Image (cartoon, rainbow, N blue to C red):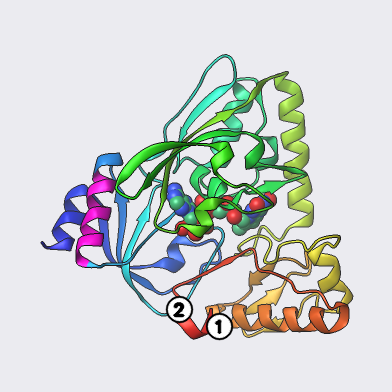
Amino acid sequence: MNIEEVLDKHGDMCIDEPLCNHTTFRIGGKAKYFVYPKNELSLTRMIEACNEVGMPYKVIGKGSNLLCHDNDYDGVIFCLDRYFIDFEFESDGKCFVSAGCSIILLANEAMKASLSGLEFASGIPATVGGTIVMNAGAYKSDMSQIVKRVRVLRDHKIEWLDVSEIGYTYRHSIFQEHPSWVVIAAQLQLTPSDQKEIRDLMDARRNRRKESQPLEKPSAGSIFRNPENHQAWELIEACGLREKQIGGAKVSEKHCNFIVNDERATAQDVAALIEHIQSEVREKFNVHLHTEVEKFNWPEKNT
Ligand SMILES: Cc1cc2nc3c(=O)[nH]c(=O)nc-3n(C[C@H](O)[C@H](O)[C@H](O)COP(=O)(O)OP(=O)(O)OC[C@H]3O[C@@H](n4cnc5c(N)ncnc54)[C@H](O)[C@@H]3O)c2cc1C
């Protein structure tokens, strides 16, 4: 079987596509194949073909939580944000949504339909699938509070998982332990509510983000998870690391838990800065900062 023919038949395929064009960090080498699958069936066929020939693959959303290595990736990237984008609301607040739909768009549409529950997500530059995998959250809310069921492709079968089977905890889900599983769609439960109240809350959240986060520079959002009883940014600040720079990577002056790609940063620059912060915080506070951002395509010894 010719893998290239299968990919070309079942999706929009690019060869040697730079991943820096598909990550919010604007960092990453080229992917041998970058494919937008057309539908569930085509995705299933392409994954089967990858498994048959032993070709590695990864499904991504908007690449807003990825630190891709500068080396090229000799595998297939499946990106769902072109064709898996439909959604539907029901009057009782049920929402059916495909995994590649933008969560910002969905939050806006939910507001227009007078449905509350997605206000917290209205500034997260991600797909629904990515937020389900990461249990993305903000302002004391997260995806686990609105997800009811998730449609998953795993072990050659497509099935629905109830939220109780997803193992949600802070920024964690079962999907992170099973990188070969693909989130295809989800059922969310939103709450009918007053449209103006939803809009006002979303506006307030958006303004707060603009004031406190370096949205004008490429980044992957918060670099570290908040350790128990601490805010990561406070620990970094207390170590005097605001604006600390290694190569083109810099701790944001606006928000210490953001590393920005200030000037043509390499993945190595960002990784070196992450390690430096971890070691300073460990030395001063005896606290280990776990990364929230995910390293992808790193040589084994460096991960
Ligand atoms: C400016 C900025 C602000 C941010 N603010 C927040 C915030 O407030 N709260 C927060 O939690 N995060 C935030 N983030 C981080 C990021 O947006 C989230 O982690 C988000 O959930 C990632 O979604 P994505 O679609 O970009 O996924 P990607 O980054 O593309 O992928 C993340 C992981 O999910 C996997 N994945 C993605 N889609 C699927 C799928 N369909 N099936 C299986 N696996 C999949 C990928 O393989 C990868 O392992 C922010 C990022 C930025 C750049």
Mark sitting earlier along the chain (1/2): 2
From the viewer's side, name the closer residue of 123 and 66: 66
Name the spot of residue 292 as percent of width and height, x first. 64, 63
- Residue type for callout 2: Asp
Is there any visible trace of residue 61 in the rendered image? no
In the rendered view, would you say 76 is above or below 43?
Answer: below
Residue 257 in the figure: left or right of residue 38? right
Of 60 and 144, which appears nearest the observer? Answer: 144
Q: Is residue 50 magenta?
A: yes
Residues at marks 1 and 2, CA–CA distance in whole angstroms: 8 Å
Between 270 and 284, the one nearer to me in the picture? 284
Q: Residue furthest top?
A: 91
Q: Is residue 10 left or right of residue 215?
A: left
Residue at the (71%, 84%) spot, across then down: 276
Q: Main secondary structure of the magenta part?
A: helix
According to the picture, the residue beneath numbered tag 1 turns out to be: 268
Residue 70, label in figure = 2
Q: Which amino acid type is shown beneath numbered disc 1?
A: Gln
Return the x and y of residue 94 as percentages of the image width and height. 55, 22
Residue positioned 57% across, 78% down in the render: 265
Residue contact between numbered discs 1 and 2, judged by CB atoms under 8 Å: yes
Q: Position of residue 278 (x, y in %)?
A: 73, 79
| Magenta span | 42-53
16 and 97: which one is in front?
97
List x then y, in percent, for residue 133: 54, 50
Is residue 180 positioned above or below 299 on the image? above
